[in-house]
Amino acid sequence: MTATTPAASPHVMNTYGRVPIALARGQGCRVWDVNGKEYLDGLGGIAVNTLGHNHAKLVPALQDQITKLIHTSNYYHVPLQEQLAAKLVELSGMQNVFFCNSGLEANEAALKIARKYGVDKGIAKPEIVVYEKAFHGRSIATMSATGNPKIHSGFGPLVEGFIRVPMNDIEAIKKATQDNPNVVAVFFETIQGEGGINPMRVEYLQQLRQLCDERGWLMMIDEVQCGVGRTGKWFAHQWAGIVPDVMPLAKGLGSGVPIGAVVAGPKAANVLQPGNHGTTFGGNPLAMRAGVETLRIMEEEGLLQNAAKVGDHLRAALQRELGSLPGVKEIRGQGLMLGVELNKPCGALIGRAAEAGLLLSVTADSVIRLVPPLILTTAEADEIVAKLTPLVKAILAE
């Protein structure tokens, strides 16, 4: 690639509003573009690059795996699947795992589990409770579960069988499902990512777990973005002391290698049988090695503790510098999954921040999202705030 400002390619489908930079290499929490300009990575590939870039322990492990096997297919046993599944079961307190390639695929599998769970109980048209502002993917089914009309637009008819409720209101879900024998599951993110970094309250999660138990529903928690250590626990729902029945994972589990997983507890562990679901690439040896090594390195380097500590530091610094500004509505989130909500659309910040040497995203139109690698230091957190503060002040003054 030549060292120039990239332009839109006529050969690549026009599905992204891209920032006009092309990244060439990375080290830790920093990346450099093809022109040599340096950026601090506050986005982590959208909560994917758990270990940052070019990690000294991950890279040799992946190189080693590439010399052995990259892909075999699920016609055969894959020992690394067993190894990664055992670790996820240990960390989650659940029972077994299905591997796929992405968060969308993991969520799609969860929806299939819920439907078959209902059909197996004699429910001809199972229904699943989902949430306002939720995001679960862009396939026809996961898009239908998603609570964003902009994502729905142009792709009707949506898949039926979803009941939508507001977050953190236990009476609302009871009312929406009253006298409905077709409800089989509740599906939600512990902290909504694309919806604007919106956390479920601990007491609500506990009430929901009780309601699912009382009514025989599956509690299905989408931890694709908020899981794998991002909040300072392995999975964000663990702050509430609960265990789900189904838990989709992806993003940070492979530190950049595409991976997805559905972890199941006893109520859901045996719903899918041979022939019910499958994948060509899912669970391939390279992705499994990436997952095994990511979790191992996270433990060795204390990255859950780091996410909690540096996340608290970053949130406090954001609160100190931005929290009292007129136009800053709220600073929220947990660990290294933080959002700064403004009282106006701020999509322009993505490009302006990149010009200032900072990568971030804006979600839900007016929420600045920070999901950096879990190796972020307090000094780098301070640098994020130093770069971001004048940009926010400028956009609020416009």
Image: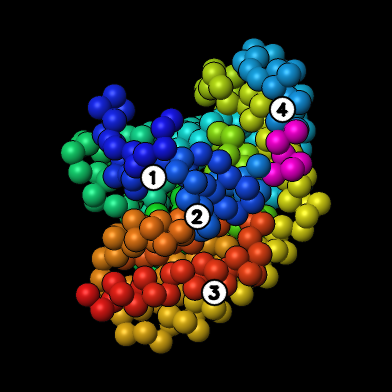
Magenta-drawn segment: 55-60
First in sequence: mark 1 vs mark 2: 1
In the picture, the quarter occupied by the N terminus is top left
Q: Which residue sits furthest left?
A: 154
Q: CA distance from mark 1 to mark 4?
A: 28 Å
Label 1 close to label 2 by CB (< 8 Å): yes
> Amino acid under label 1?
Ile
Q: Position of residue 187 (x, y in %)?
A: 46, 50
Residue annotated with mark 3: 315
Which is closer to the viewer, label 4 or label 2? 2
Q: How far is the residue under mark 1 from the one under mark 2?
A: 11 Å
The residue that mark 1 highlights is 21
Give the label on residue 235, or none. none
Q: Which mark is residue 63?
A: 4
Is residue 80 something that shows in the picture? yes
Name the residue: 22% across, 75% down: 398
SS at mark 2 in the image: strand
Colour convention:
rainbow
Q: Residue at x 20, y 43 (%)?
A: 153
Q: Nearer the viewer, residue 99 or 117?
A: 99
Question: Do we see residue 133 in this rendering?
Answer: no
Looking at marks 3 and 2 on the same chain, the residue that comes earlier in the sequence is marked by 2
**Which circle marks residue 39 in the picture?**
2
User: On screen, 371 above or below 97?
Assistant: below
Three-letter residue code for mark 4: Gln
Cα separation between marks 3 and 2: 20 Å
